[in-house]
Image (cartoon, rainbow, N blue to C red):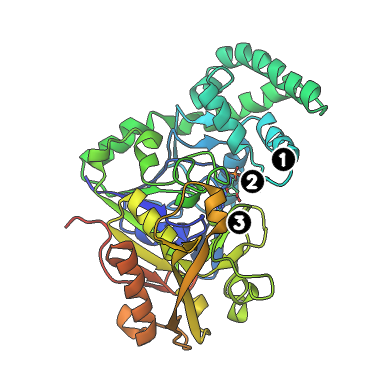
């Protein structure tokens, strides 16, 4: 029963998509367990690039079953659009399966996402405005929620939507003074989606458990990162789900006893898109060295929104925090090559708060805002790492840096990524944790 979780250890965009795609070659299934199309996973094959928001990153392999679990919130229009665009590029996506228990993003969700964000003044979250938060609100509020199984039951959906829409329209018009939405076109549009999705919908908990029982290798694909986790992240500047390994069981219907390894994915530096604290963030006049980097290889612009990402040095406090909450068994370090030109590389080893040294991430953002990062410096390697074929080919200084990261997160190095292409990936150890 080899179940391997791929979890981001920072604020998302650690390169999980690339790592999943790389490992999917030796897997039979890839399962998404939370988030929605706020995610943006980039996968490269040859010189071609693919960007996925909802489709699991194993979708390019014909023999891999890709699953969207019950913990994901699904915008059916976006999902069908992604399926169609892959079909046009010659990929067969008939092996995709969608949970009958996943919740549906309705047209009012992205609208409410924007309106709620506009209400905030200096506490804007920087949401992707894809309706993720409002869809999860409805899920937990229960009454207004629509699940995939509800959508497929036309009679039930026809009866339910008018009641839900009446409430949403009242919210839109009375509270926000915004235009209301029409029932009939929405009903027709979503009933159309239902028919297009129907062949893909199943009880995915049964499917994934069956695969695990048969000894198949199953990858659980996290979206976003542990610092965006609703419980363990920099609340309230977080997403609305559990991107950490803890989200897997609830988001897929697979028990914790069926998961045997967690690969933490971490960038060799740190990025964040959207608002919220970021202790090691570089000031605007220095950020380009990471965001664009040498020859533009940094490419730190949001896959979903195109926003420039905030960039800064590696932060060991958050790395240790995330390694702990995920219980990682191995680590993958990505974008090492972006550090190639640096003479010295700074890393934050702790925070100084009112004269005291802090080793753990504080819960209170008021405390975090006062924390000053304590830095140590590593000697840069100032050589091109992108041509390395194995870990041993890396300059000695780069290996020292990787070893320090592995020591920091208290897990063996499994993968180092030195470029965006599949072949620019170096293996140091087997992340599956099974023979
Ligand atoms: P939401 O999930 O769209 O509401 O966004 C909440 C916060 O999470 C914002 O700061 C977003 O920028 C951030 N976020 C959401 N999804 C991702 C992602 O896939 N990568 C990086 N940041 C994300
Ligand atoms: Mg991303």
Q: Is mark 3 within 8 Å of ligand 1?
A: yes
Q: Nearer the viewer, mark 3 or mark 2?
A: 2
The x, y position of residue 36, in whole percent, is: 54, 41
Q: Is mark 2 within 8 Å of ligand 1?
A: yes
Q: Is residue 124 visible?
A: yes
Separation of disc 1 and disc 2 at Cα? 8 Å
The x, y position of residue 246, in whole percent, is: 36, 42
| Within-10-Å neighbours for mark 2: few <14, some 14–19, many 20+ | some
Q: On screen, 377 above or below 14?
A: below
Question: Residue at (61%, 56%) from the top-left corner?
Answer: 273
Exactly how many numbered labels are in the figure? 3
Q: Nearer the viewer, mark 1 or mark 3?
A: 1
Q: Which residue is mark 3?
A: 273
The x, y position of residue 209, in whole percent, is: 28, 36
Name the outermost residue toward the left: 435
Of the numbered discs 1 and 3, the one sitting upstream in the chain is 1
Q: Secondary structure at mark 3?
A: loop
**Label of residue 125 in the image:** 2
Q: Secondary structure at mark 2?
A: loop
Q: On screen, 115 above or below 408?
A: above
Q: Which residue is mark 1?
A: 120
Question: Which quarter of the picture shows residue 256?
Answer: top left
Q: Secondary structure at mark 1?
A: loop
Question: Which quarter of the picture shows residue 22?
Answer: bottom left
**Label of residue 145 in the image:** none
Separation of disc 3 and disc 2 at Cα? 10 Å
Judge left or right: residue 216 versus residue 276. left
Please tell me which residue lies in front, 203 or 392. 392
Judge left or right: residue 199 versus residue 188. left
Name the outermost residue toward the front: 355
Quadrant (top left/top right/bottom left/bottom right) for the N terminus = top left
Task: Find out whether the residues at labels 1 and 2 contact each other: C-beta distance under 8 Å.
Answer: yes
């Amino acid at each position: 029963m080899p179940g391997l979780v791929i979890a981001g250890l920072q604020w998302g965009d650690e390169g999980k998509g690339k790592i999943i795609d790389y490992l999917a070659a030796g897997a039979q299934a890839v399962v998404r367990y939370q988030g929605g199309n706020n995610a943006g996973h980039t996968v490269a094959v040859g010189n071609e690039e693919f960007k996925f928001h909802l489709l699991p990153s194993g979708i390019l392999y014909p023999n891999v079953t890709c699953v969207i679990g019950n913990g994901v919130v699904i915008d059916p229009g976006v999902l069908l659009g992604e399926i169609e665009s892959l079909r046009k590029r010659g990929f067969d996506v008939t092996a995709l399966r969608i949970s009958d228990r996943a919740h549906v993003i309705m047209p009012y969700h992205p609208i409410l996402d924007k309106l709620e964000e506009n209400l905030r003044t200096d506490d804007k979250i920087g949401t992707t405005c894809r309706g993720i938060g409002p869809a999860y609100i409805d899920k937990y509020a229960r009454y207004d929620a629509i699940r995939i199984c509800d959508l497929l039951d036309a009679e039930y959906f026809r009866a339910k939507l008018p009641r839900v829409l009446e409430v949403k329209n009242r919210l839109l018009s009375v509270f926000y003074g915004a235009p209301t939405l029409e029932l009939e076109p929405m009903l027709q549009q979503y009933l159309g989606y239902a028919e297009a999705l129907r062949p893909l919908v199943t009880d995915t908990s049964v499917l994934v458990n069956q695969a695990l029982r048969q000894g198949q290798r199953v990858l659980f694909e996290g979206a976003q990162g542990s610092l965006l986790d609703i419980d363990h992240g920099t609340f309230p500047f977080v997403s609305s789900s559990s991107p950490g390994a803890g989200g897997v069981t609830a988001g897929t219907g697979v028990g914790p006893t069926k998961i045997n390894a967690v690969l933490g994915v971490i960038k060799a530096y740190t990025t964040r898109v959207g608002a919220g604290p970021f202790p090691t963030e570089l000031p605007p006049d220095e950020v380009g060295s990471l965001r664009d980097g040498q020859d533009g290889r940094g490419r730190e612009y949001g896959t979903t929104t195109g926003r420039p990402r905030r960039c800064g040095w590696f932060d060991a406090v958050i790395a240790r925090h995330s390694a702990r909450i995920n219980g990682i068994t191995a680590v993958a370090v990505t974008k090492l090559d972006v550090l190639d030109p640096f003479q010295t590389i700074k890393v934050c080893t702790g925070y100084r708060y009112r004269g005291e040294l802090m080793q753990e991430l504080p819960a209170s953002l008021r405390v975090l805002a006062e924390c000053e990062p304590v830095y140590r410096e590593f000697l840069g390697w100032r050589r091109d790492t992108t041509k390395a074929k194995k870990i041993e080919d890396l300059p000695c200084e780069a290996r020292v840096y990787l070893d320090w990261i592995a020591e920091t997160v208290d897990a063996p190095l499994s993968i180092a990524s030195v470029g965006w292409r599949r072949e620019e990936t170096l293996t140091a150890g087997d992340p599956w944790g099974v023979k």
